[in-house]
Amino acid sequence: MPEAIDLLTSRRSVKPRELTGPGPTEAELATLLTVASRVPDHGKLTPWRFIVFEGEARQKAGEIIAAVFRERRPDATPDQVEHERRRLAQAPLVVAVVSRAVPHVKIPEWEQVLSAGAAATSLVLAAHALGFAASWLTQWYAYDRKVLDALGVAPEEKIAAFVHIGRPAQPGPDRPRPPLEQIVTRFGTE
């Protein structure tokens, strides 16, 4: 089997709390983002962009998330608030993939959204190819306008993914995958 297929079939998500450092170097990060930007993009609209959270920026973003959480949940316990504060600080690197689909006369918005999803997928696969592990997540804060505003996400933009990247602290089991006969049909056959 070709090496690329081995790579693709061995990719698995690793929970952010199970990721450790060191994270990608600047050169590796540039490679990750370059690969992530080489996705189908009908009309060359670049309907996505990236926000990088590394170093202290992860804690700064966590303070924003915790503050909004506290505001939305005044009954929250200190442990719950602390959990929210650490959302983007568990992995050494987090990259937000921001979908910025716009109405276009020829390119449906749906195709632009799918392009952002493809960018997130390519980012996850590139991380795996470089020997890292990744986890694509969206949580409540990916949909909270106050958090998004504070993170620099424009009103017309949406978070497609927060991709947490690091090294797996320990190898873990893969999850069961659906058998092909459950997810594949062939048109025109009975």
Image: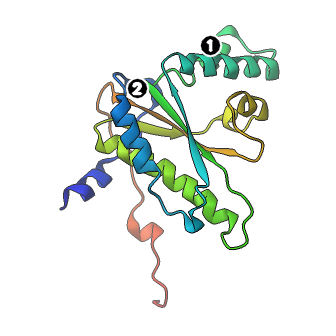
Image-quadrant location for residue 161: top right
At 55% across and 21% down in the image, what residue appears? 58
Horizontal and vertical percent for residue 148? 71, 33
> Most extreme residue toward the top, as rendered?
78
Instruction: Name the residue at 78% across, 30% down.
Output: 146
Q: Quadrant of the N terminus?
A: bottom left
Report the residue at 39% width, 63% height from top.
179
Q: Is residue 183 above or below residue 53?
A: below
Query: Sequence order check: which comes first, mark 2 or mark 1?
Result: 2
Kindly identify which numbered label has been placed on residue 173: none
| Residue 20 in sight in this render | yes
> In the rendered image, which residue does mark 2 sit on?
18
Q: Tell me if residue 12 can be seen.
A: no
Q: What residue would you read off at disc 1?
A: 82
Q: Residues within 10 Å of mark 1 (few under 14, many from 20)?
A: some
Identity of the amino acid at label 2? Glu
Q: Residue at x 39, y 67 (%)?
A: 180
> Dot 2 lies on which element?
helix
Q: Is residue 5 left or right of residue 74?
A: left
Q: Which structural element holds mark 1? A: helix
Q: Is residue 145 above or below residue 121?
A: above
Q: Is residue 112 above or below residue 87?
A: below
Picture mark count: 2
Q: Nearer the viewer, residue 36 or 180?
A: 36
Crowd around label 2: few <14 · some 14–19 · many ≥20 (10 Å): some
Q: Amino acid at mark 1?
A: Glu
Of residues 127 and 135, which is closer to you in this image? 127
Can you give x and y, in whole percent of width and height, for residue 83 in the image? 60, 18
Residue 105 percent location from the top left of the image: 73, 72
Q: Position of residue 118 (x, y in %)?
A: 50, 56
Q: CA distance from mark 2 to mark 1?
A: 18 Å
